[in-house]
Image (cartoon, grey):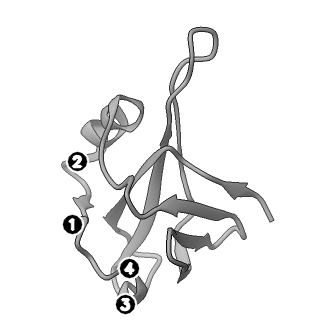
Amino acid sequence: MTNYKPDNWIVLKIPTALEASGFIYKVLGGWSGGYLDGDSWRMNSGIARVEEDNQYYYFYGHSGSCYQCNKESYGLRNNNYHIYESMKDKTILMDENTNWMELL
């Protein structure tokens, strides 16, 4: 299993004909880079399961990856904003107050 720990993150609700519900939820994570490596982003394959502890949500993807997301780091920043902007007409940005444990 591949684990990712983004510096900030959001969840997108994306319409799809591949799911019976008509949509899929995906984590869009962002990492702040330094002088030499720059910012980066990654989107998971789709949320299949969610767990939590006191500090983190653990979003398990359909591909088997896990995104360990700090509860205090939900939101758009420079490292993921441009990706969201390019998709915003086709997606729904989930509210930060969403109960992630009841997402699926």
- Relative height, residue 89 to residue 12 (above, below): above
Alpha carbon separation for disc pair 4 and 1: 10 Å
Callout 3 touching callout 4 (CB < 8 Å):
yes
| Residue located beneath label 1 in the image | 95
Look at label 1 and name its amino acid. Answer: Asp
Q: Is residue 88 left or right of residue 68?
A: left
Q: In the image, what residue occupies the spot 39% across and 52% down?
A: 73
Cα distance in 3D space between marks 3 and 4: 5 Å
Which residue is pictured at 21% across the width and 66% down the height? Answer: 95
Q: Which residue corresponds to mark 4?
A: 100
Q: Position of residue 18 (x, y in %)?
A: 47, 76
Which is closer to the viewer, label 4 or label 2? 4
The residue pinned by badge 3 equals 102
Query: Mark 3 falls on what kind of element?
Result: helix
Are circles 4 and 1 on residues that touch, CB within 8 Å? no
Residues at circles 1 and 2 in contact by the CB criterion of under 8 Å: no
Q: Label 2 belongs to which residue?
A: 88
